[in-house]
Image: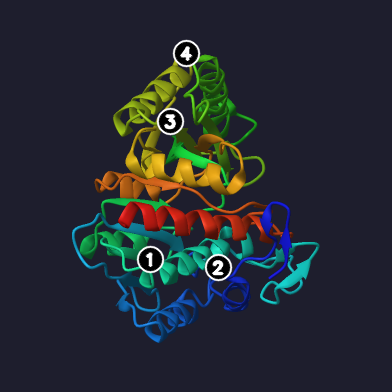
């Protein structure tokens, strides 16, 4: 291992991380025909079995396994769960996504940052825990499907719990104590078709959807004018997809839009549903024949953990020790499985490596940050569960 003035430049888990990146685990719910997590799950399970850890395989849907590894403590101490997802997004535009490339202290490849680096670091911390004779249990949950429906963490929570958790999503070595949720609505405007030379005989669903889109813009301006959440900023309201109309020279009878509302900690499903109702009502004011409907198709709650939760305090202390300064404490703009863990009553922190290109063709992780993450996780595990 090479070192720098700030500590190890390469993580102990480098060879393991290279193996993880080589194992394609593209989520088949995102890319039809993709292999999913099976190969990765077997790699993780075999690694755990080689080290004498307790290994449990969970497969709520065929071909979508998750693996739970447990380093059992001697008893009397609190338990800690390290959570990392195995699945990745697709690889369009990438030349060699599963051939990891080392360059200038960075590792390139699909999943290198999001989030096989976090999984490798968590596995290193678990191995150290197994050798440390701790009082409390340490669990590693390597889960499927975080990038889509989170069936992996949902299945884990049906059988396993812990006194605290760390989700090792890439945070740039920042402590993330909160993140946004989201609600996705399918919006429809319903018109009446007619010859386009006689628009008065029809009702134009596309133009009526334009009124809805203008209302979404006004709602975004309102959200931006509110006091921001101290960790996650402002809420977001945006249309992300639209389709409508049948053909030229016909007044369109139908239009559909997908609407995404990024929610802040404290905002509820009832609030965002009321916003949509008010949005459609306002869009219809003064519009002849206006009819619209909305269906909530996907909901993920926001997440926030108390700044004085013990897992946060312990992580804060070890991050300062390893980094030589206080870690930034903020929130994530994206959603993670931390929300499911927190909702299950497990105080949870999001903390992981540093890099660039999540979901992009140039995805890479900074290896020095993975080394720092390993050292911090080992310290946190041993103090929290010791």
Can you tell which of label 3 and label 2 is closer to the viewer?
3
Measured as percent of width and height from the top left, residue 140 is found at 38, 66
- Spatial distance from mark 3 to mark 2, Cα to Cα? 29 Å
Q: Residue at x 51, y 78 (%)?
A: 35
- Spatial distance from mark 4 to mark 1, Cα to Cα? 57 Å
Image disc number at residue 140:
1
Tag 4 near tag 2, CB within 8 Å = no
- Spatial distance from mark 1 to mark 2, Cα to Cα? 27 Å
Image disc number at residue 31:
2
The residue singled out by tag 4 in the image is 286
Image disc number at residue 264:
3
- Spatial distance from mark 3 to mark 1, Cα to Cα? 28 Å
Q: Earlier in the sequence, mark 4 or mark 3?
A: 3
The one nearer the camera, 133 or 334, is: 133
Q: Earlier in the sequence, mark 3 or mark 2?
A: 2
Left or right of residue 306: residue 230: right
Q: Quadrant of residue 308?
A: top left
Measured as percent of width and height from the top left, residue 275 is found at 39, 24
């Amino acid at each position: 291992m090479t070192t720098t003035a700030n500590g190890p430049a390469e993580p102990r888990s480098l060879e393991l991380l290279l193996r993880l990146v080589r194992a394609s685990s593209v989520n088949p719910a995102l890319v039809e025909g993709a292999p999913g997590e099976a190969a990765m799950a077997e790699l993780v399970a075999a690694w755990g079995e080689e080290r004498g850890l307790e290994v449990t395989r969970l497969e709520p849907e065929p071909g979508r396994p998750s693996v739970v590894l447990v380093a059992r403590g001697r008893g009397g101490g609190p338990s800690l769960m390290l959570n990392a997802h195995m699945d990745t997004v697709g690889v369009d535009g990438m030349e060699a996504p599963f051939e990891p490339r080392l360059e200038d202290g960075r590792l390139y490849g699909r999943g290198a940052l999001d989030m096989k680096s976090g999984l490798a670091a968590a596995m290193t911390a678990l191995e150290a825990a197994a050798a440390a004779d701790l009082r409390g249990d340490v669990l590693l949950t390597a889960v499927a499907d975080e990038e889509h429906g989170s069936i992996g963490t949902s299945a884990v929570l049906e059988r396993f719990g812990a006194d605290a958790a760390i989700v090792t999503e890439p945070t740039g070595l920042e402590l993330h104590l909160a993140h946004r949720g989201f609600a996705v609505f399918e919006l429809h405007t319903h018109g009446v078709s007619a010859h386009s030379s006689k628009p008065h005989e029809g009702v134009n669903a596309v133009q009526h959807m334009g009124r809805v889109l203008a209302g979404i813009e006004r709602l975004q301006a309102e959200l931006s004018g509110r006091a921001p959440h101290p960790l996650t900023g402002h809420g977001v309201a945006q249309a992300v997809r639209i389709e409508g109309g049948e053909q030229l020279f016909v007044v369109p009878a139908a239009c559909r839009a997908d609407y995404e509302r990024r929610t802040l900690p404290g905002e509820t499903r009832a609030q965002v549903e009321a916003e949509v109702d008010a949005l459609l009502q306002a869009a219809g004011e003064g519009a002849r024949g206006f009819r619209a409907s909305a269906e909530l198709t996907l909901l993920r709650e926001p997440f926030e953990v108390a700044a004085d939760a013990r897992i946060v305090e312990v992580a804060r202390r070890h991050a300062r020790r390893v980094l030589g300064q206080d870690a930034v404490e903020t929130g994530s703009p994206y959603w993670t499985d931390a929300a499911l863990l927190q909702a299950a009553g497990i105080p949870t922190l999001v903390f992981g490596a540093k890099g660039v290109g999540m979901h992009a063709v140039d995805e890479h992780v900074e290896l020095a940050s993975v080394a720092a993450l390993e050292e911090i996780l080992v310290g946190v595990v041993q103090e929290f569960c010791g």
